[in-house]
């Protein structure tokens, strides 16, 4: 059973930065892909950025140039560096890992950006 534990959320002013972490119970390089999603109040959960097993990165346009996904395989940890944060980035952020046909989720971490 894969466990994902997120940390790093919090309250930040617009223009500020946060770094989210997602530590996995297993070797992150075993996952076909890992990703960050977010869910704003009253809205559906949406994909933000992905990194595949071989390191290919995908990212949505609204955060491109501001958010960066990375990983440290020695620490089995996925990161999301978020810069130039905007109030519309306020959401619960979730880590996701795909292993064969199974999807695993972290518990979510709240990010609140004040104007």
Image (spheres, rainbow, N blue to C red):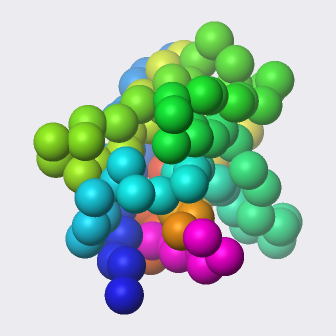
Q: Depth check: 102 or 95 in front?
A: 102
Q: What stretch is highlighted in magenta?
A: 100-106
Q: Residue, x 54% and y 68% (percent of image)?
A: 99
Q: Quadrant of residue 87?
A: top right
| The C terminus, quarter of image | top right
Assess whether residue 47 is covered by the magenta stretch: no
Residue 36 higher or lower than 2, as above or below: above
Estimate the x, y position of residue 67 in percent, counting from the top left.
Answer: 56, 25
Estimate the x, y position of residue 5 in percent, counting from the top left.
Answer: 31, 68
Residue 44 higher or lower than 67, as above or below: below
The residue at the far bottom in this view is 1
Can residue 60 be seen?
A: yes
The residue at the far top in this view is 65
Q: Residue, x 70% and y 30% (percent of image)?
A: 58
Residue 72 higher or lower than 34, as above or below: above
Q: Depth check: 5 or 33 in front?
A: 33
Q: In which quarter of the image is residue 22?
A: bottom left
* 53 left or right of 74 in image: right
């Amino acid at each position: 059973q894969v466990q994902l534990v997120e940390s790093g959320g919090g309250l930040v002013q617009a223009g500020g930065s946060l770094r989210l972490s997602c530590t996995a119970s297993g070797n992150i390089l075993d996952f076909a892909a890992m990703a960050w999603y977010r869910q704003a109040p009253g809205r559906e959960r949406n994909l933000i950025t992905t990194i595949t097993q071989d390191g290919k990165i995908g990212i949505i346009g609204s955060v491109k140039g501001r958010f960066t996904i990375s990983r440290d395989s020695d620490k089995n940890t996925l990161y999301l560096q978020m810069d130039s944060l905007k109030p519309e980035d306020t959401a619960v952020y979730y880590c996701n890992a795909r292993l064969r046909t199974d999807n695993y989720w972290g518990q979510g971490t709240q990010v609140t950006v004040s104007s």
